Amino acid sequence: MDHNEDASLVESDPVADLTVNFSETAQILFSAGSVVDTLSSVVDLAVATIEGCDFAGLFLIEDGLVSTPVHTDPIVVEVDALQHLTGQRPLSRRHHRANHLLRRRLEH
């Protein structure tokens, strides 16, 4: 390997790398099909690309009911249920406050 080949291996264009990553992610997400398939792709990508992420899931709140329609492992559903029971759910306080503020604005 000559000096020029060494230099090309060391030098990396972070913008080009990011562009490739976004392009690959977009292709995966847009090829998924249904909403559930797309959300499943999101959680799979999270585990594959986020260092230290062993499991992932998305919870949805619809009509005040919380569900975890997509997850990479059943433990995610168990953790979500425990967080819900103990009131320690991520964003639960913010969600409650946002709903309260929205209701107050709609009443006036």
Image: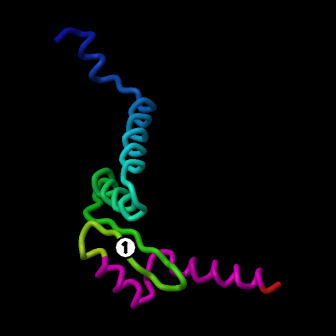
Which amino acid lies under the numbered mark 1 shown in the image of this protein?
Pro
Dominant secondary structure of the residues highlighted in magenta in the image: helix
Image coords of residue 37 (percent x, y):
36, 60
Residue that label 1 marks: 69
Figure label count: 1
Boundaries of the magenta span: 77-106
- Image quadrant where residue 34 sits: bottom left
Q: In terms of image quadrants, where is residue 46?
A: bottom left
Q: Secondary structure at mark 1?
A: strand
**Most distant residue in the right direction:** 108
Q: Residue at x 41, y 86 (%)?
A: 84
Left/right of residue 107 with respect to residue 28 in the rendered view: right
Q: Name the residue rendered at 40%, 69% in the picture.
A: 58
- Residue 67: horizontal and vertical position, in percent? 41, 79
* The C terminus lies in quadrant: bottom right
Location of the N terminus by quadrant is: top left
On the rendered structure, is 28 left or right of 61?
A: left
